[in-house]
Structure formats: C-alpha cells, structure tokens
Amino acid sequence: MSEPLRVVLVDDQELVRAGFRVILGAEPDIEVVGEASNGVTAISEVARLRPDVVLMDVQMPEMDGLAATGQILGDTDAGYLPKIVILTTFDDENYLFEALRAGASGFLLKNSAPEDLVESVRIVARGDALLSPEVTRRVITRFAGLAPADNQPAADYRPPELTEREYEVLILLARGSSNAEIAAQLYLGETTVKTHVSRVLTKLDLRDRTHAVVFAYEKGIVTPGSA
C-alpha cells in the first residue's frame, strides 16, 4: 500500500481548516500533516513538513496566499516543489491568474462539495490540472489579458521544441479540452493523448496542465475569446 498523500492546510479561519481537516482525514489515502493561518507560517511549515499538496487561502494577514505561493514554488533550492491549490470564491477572480502564473496547480471554490475537496487533492497530486474545461474557459480566458503586454510574442508563435501534433495538443489544452475531447478532435486514443500531453509538459519544462494553459496564453498561442 502506498503512503497517504500529505496535505498542509493554509487559511486564517480556524473553522475552515477544521472542516477541511475532518473531510480529508476521513480518507485513507490522505493525511493532514500541518496547518497555517497566514502565508509566513505556511512557508515555514511547507519547508519543514514537505507535503505533497498545499491548500492555500488567498486573503490572510501578514502575507497573502499569492505571495506565499510565489515564494514556495520559487524556491528551487528546496529540492522539491509541492502542488498548491488556491482556495477561493468567485469574488477573488482578480487574483486567480496571478496565482496560476506563480505556479499554482489550480483553484478550488470554498463552497465546493466535500467530495470535490477530496478529489482536488488527488488530482493535483498526480500532476493533473485542477481546472475543468468549463472553468478554464470562464476564468483563464477572461484574465489572460493580465499578462504584461511586452511579454506577448507574436500570435503565430510556435515553440520549436514541439512537433506539429504536440503543438495541436497544446492549443486544445489551452482551450480547456479534456483528454477525451482532445482524442475526439484529433482522432487519437486517450492513451496517445496522455503521452502527447506528457511530452509537451516535459519539452516546455511545465509543471502541469494548468501551467501549460498559462504558457499558451502568455505566449499568444491562444488568445482570450479564442476558446
């Protein structure tokens, strides 16, 4: 039996952390190993505990979740990088794109169902993006325009590392397509699509599918509204 996924909860509301702890603690493959009430403590706890997944609130005292996410995932000397899921409400939409650019693996609405919370931990732990096609279209497309204009290459930019097929897969990823949808559109098997996705991430040095979406928008490979 494999070791349970190690999770750190970061939220300034104790009741929120307690609720998440109860939900996650009921799962045999998940273990809550630590908690923090602000970004400063989160950074030290993540360094000490080395969790697999961090559930990170945005608005907290002393240091917010965006700054903490950037510092945790920017510490390449740490020897490992956890997966970070941003806890948010749609009132926090303005923060989301910056969180993803900082390297977060996705976001979870605070009013999500308990089973969605549990599944979110499993999804990001295995390297997948916690962004459904619907959410990708609704949020990432809308806020991709926050990227600095002087960092935007020409719209016909194509990463030279990618084959034609891998480039097609990247475009569909950025438009919010699932593996099944990509397979249907390109007339491929889902196993083949998974292989192409893995190669795209490896060749472009991207953490996960979420990072691939951000990359594609920042490079002008896809543009807001094109999905």
Image: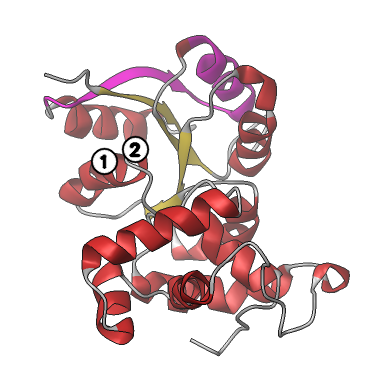
Q: Which residue is mark 1?
A: 122
Residue 61 percent coordinates (x, y)? 63, 33
Towards the viewer: 86 or 201:
201
Label 2, residues with CA under 10 Å away: few <14, some 14-19, many ≥20: many
Image: 40 above or below 104? above
Q: Which residues are magenta?
A: 28-48
Q: Which amino acid, mark 2?
A: Ala
Is 202 on the left or on the right of 98, as rendered?
left
Task: Identify the disc placed on residue 125.
Answer: 2
Query: For the residue labelled by badge 1, is the local secondary structure a helix, a strand or a loop?
Result: helix
Q: Which amino acid, mark 1?
A: Arg
- Kindly report the distance in space between the C-alpha atoms of the residues bearing marks 1 and 2: 5 Å
Residue 174 percent coordinates (x, y)? 50, 72
Kindly tell me whether residue 88 is visible in this rendering: no
Q: Residue furthest front?
A: 163
Name which quarter of the figure residue 161 lies in: bottom right
Residue 180 drawn in magenta:
no
Q: Are marks 1 and 2 in contact (CB under 8 Å)?
A: yes
Is 24 on the left or on the right of 226, as rendered?
left
Q: How many marks?
A: 2
Q: Residue furthest top?
A: 48
Query: For the residue labelled by badge 2, is the local secondary structure a helix, a strand or a loop?
Result: helix
Label 1, residues with CA under 10 Å away: few <14, some 14-19, many ≥20: some
Residue 163 percent coordinates (x, y)? 54, 70
Towards the viewer: 169 or 117:
169
Name the residue located 68 percent from the left edge and 34 percent from the top edge: 74
Towards the viewer: 28 or 39:
28
Quarter the N terminus occupies: top left
